[in-house]
Image (cartoon, rainbow, N blue to C red):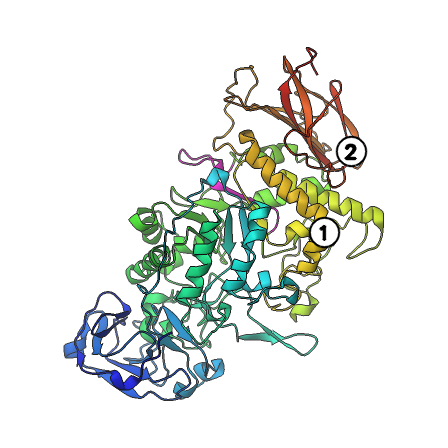
Amino acid sequence: MQTPPFRSAGRVTAGHPQPPGATPDEAGVNFSLFSEHADRVQLLLFDTAEDPQPSRVIELDPAVHRSRPFWHCHVAGLRPGQIYAYRVDGPDRTRDPGTRFDFRKVLLDPRARANVNTLWDRVRAIGPGDNCAHAMRSVVVDMDDYDWEDDAPPRTPLSDTVVYEMHVRGLTASPTSRVRRPGTYAGVVEKIPYLTDLGITAVELMPVFDFDERQVLRTGPDGEPLRAYWGYDPFGFFAPHSGYCSDPCRHHATEFRDMVKALHRAGIEVILDVVFHHTAEGGEHGPTISFRGQANDAYYHLWPRDRRPYMDFTGRGNALNANHPAVAGFIVDCLEFWVREYHVDGFRFDRASELHRGPGGFGMAAPPVLRGIELSGALAEVKLIAEPRDGGGLYQVGRFPGRRWAQWNGPFRDDVRRFVRGDGGLVGAVASRIGGSPDLFRGAHERPTSSVNFVTCHDGFTLNDLVSYDHKHNDGNGEANADGAHENHSWNCGVEGPTDAAEVERLRVRQIKNFAAVLLISRGVPMILAGDEFRNSQRGNNHAHCQDNAVSWLDWDQADKETEVRGFFRGMIAVRRRFPALRAPEFFSGRTNERGVPDVSWHGTRLHRPGWDDPHARVLSLTLAGFHGQPDVHVVLNMHRRGLDFELPHIAGHRWFRVVDTARPAGEDVLAPGAEVPVQGRVLHAHGHSVVLLMTRPDQGGTHS
């Protein structure tokens, strides 16, 4: 970061209201801030991030520096790297219109490209009095000062996408990662060879917008402070989180861009998990960081009564008023900024149903912010993924408004977990999930790729813990094990937690393979939680949001040790890529291929008898037609505890060959092209709790299977 001496600052002129934020040019820097009801604004300039007081205070004259609702000025001589902040004052009318100005508080620029927190004290931002010596500050960044070289987005079709959800720090923070800069964007770059070897096509980064990682949520049982780790409380929506930089005190656009560019060169897309339903300022007694002190009535949903307290559909103290015109514009601008300046390839919207709420918190038929996102030319080719719920009880899976959105499919998670565990009567639901959930995504514009399929994600058990624990073990979170989901549809395979029992361990490995197999044979967009492919554990903690330690960090020694499961994941991703019938972007329609095989046929142990209405059924098999010269595929799912015989369909002139069998050991569980084993006869024996996948080949010997 360039750190120019303040003394180069010169003449202050009116400047321009657009674009908002701090924009450097050849002569200096233009500053513009949205604050519709303010009657006084000061721009504070600091020589360094460590200075407790500004070197210069610029009082903005409303007659010169205001173009409603923006306050603006141009300061000659300033350069990128300049540290700045604001003070904003106005009528403290909490009843009408709901403003909460406090001139004693130093405020960040909501559109700052970088922020520094060297002196930050959260308590001083909450309590009374001046907090200048303890406030965060913003940094002027030249977004044009970077060579993208020949960077181009991979543009992987959704039907071919395999998502890997990961936490930037958690990926490499552990000493076991053996990277040069652990816990950083640069650390991610060092793990790219591993990601390409695994075969994933996109990383979904848990929140990277600037957030307050120093926030102490509570004290753990061991007396250690528990801090915000996941990052779902943003305050800097235009700034990469400084804590993931190798030098947090320098502007970090370069490090984030280097990561994106390196991932793109490896053919891996970058999807950001974004939070637009609340901010880090929280409720009535939260810190004043920026939004509350500049335009409280615009940014937040407020109750229409005395003191105008905050509506809260999020569980975080406030709810962002996303469909207010200024806020909707802020959100669309933010997304376009990350695509334009950081070349990101898509967004996953946390609790996206909050974006559906309008005045008074009520749902809207055509939310302006969602329409704005869909109609944005800059966002036309990026992936949009919604978590179709909010903290206020609104759940919209299959009903999320809009035409471009893929959605996290919670029913996929729950149905598949229960089925693989061995619950009966789920074969109809599981057939729907494998087919892309047409029961949920039935709109004219929807396809299987509207469904993001997952068994695990950051919030809940890891895959290893799903097969190792019947109950959550969140005591370390300091909430007496009351937090986190109570029902996980898990099964510990006979022993709670780690065990040396070889039989239990073999069953757990098989169950993990079963989950991976079902996920990767299902139509839609599969998402894998980072570390699941090598049995990473959180020790039974299913809500590790405050565990910035070995509980949440990936254990790469475990990755070196657990080669069987890792090899199976790698093999299944390759199998999905190899057989188009597994990832076709259309729902099943009954059409047949050149051999007369329907696109799907459903069976049980006997052909064409799937047992839809059998409350005890724990088996399902299906035949998928290959088109355009591709082989047909047959899948057997046996979730009984005992082995069973399954009839195989007869396809004239072809034989069945085994490709996958989760009951077999490493090296035999997934077979490489050319190494497939022929199946003898017309019956397949599938072991208990196993998945088998077969493919057809022309019968060279003149006999038929």
> In the image, residue 66 lies at what x, y percent?
19, 74
Tell me where residue 253 sits by quadrant: bottom left
Residue at which label 2 appears: 687
Of residue 250 and residue 304, the one placed in the foreground of this image is 250
Question: How many neighbours does mark 2 have within 10 angstroms: few (below 14), some (14-19), or many (20 or more)?
Answer: many
Of residue 318 and residue 448, the one placed in the foreground of this image is 448
> In the image, residue 528 lies at what x, y percent?
58, 48
Secondary structure beneath dot 1 equals loop
Of residue 560 and residue 584, the one placed in the foreground of this image is 560
Q: Based on the picture, tell me whether residue 335 belongs to the magenta stretch.
A: no
Which tag is nearer the camera, tag 1 or tag 2?
1
Horizontal side of residue 22 vs 189, given as left or right: left
Residue drawn at x 60%, y 32% is 431
Q: Is residue 280 at all visible to an observer of this figure? A: yes
In the image, the segment drawn in magenta is 440-456
Image quarter (top left, top right, bottom left or bottom right) of the C terminus = top right
Q: Is residue 628 above or below residue 92?
A: above
Tell me which numbered mark, 1 or 2, is placed earlier along the sequence: 1
Secondary structure beneath dot 2 equals loop
Image quarter (top left, top right, bottom left or bottom right) of the N terminus = bottom left
Tag of residue 562: 1
Residue drawn at x 30%, y 59% is 329
Q: Is residue 508 above or below residue 684?
A: below
Q: Is residue 66 above or below residue 155?
A: below
Q: Is residue 522 at all visible to an observer of this figure? A: no
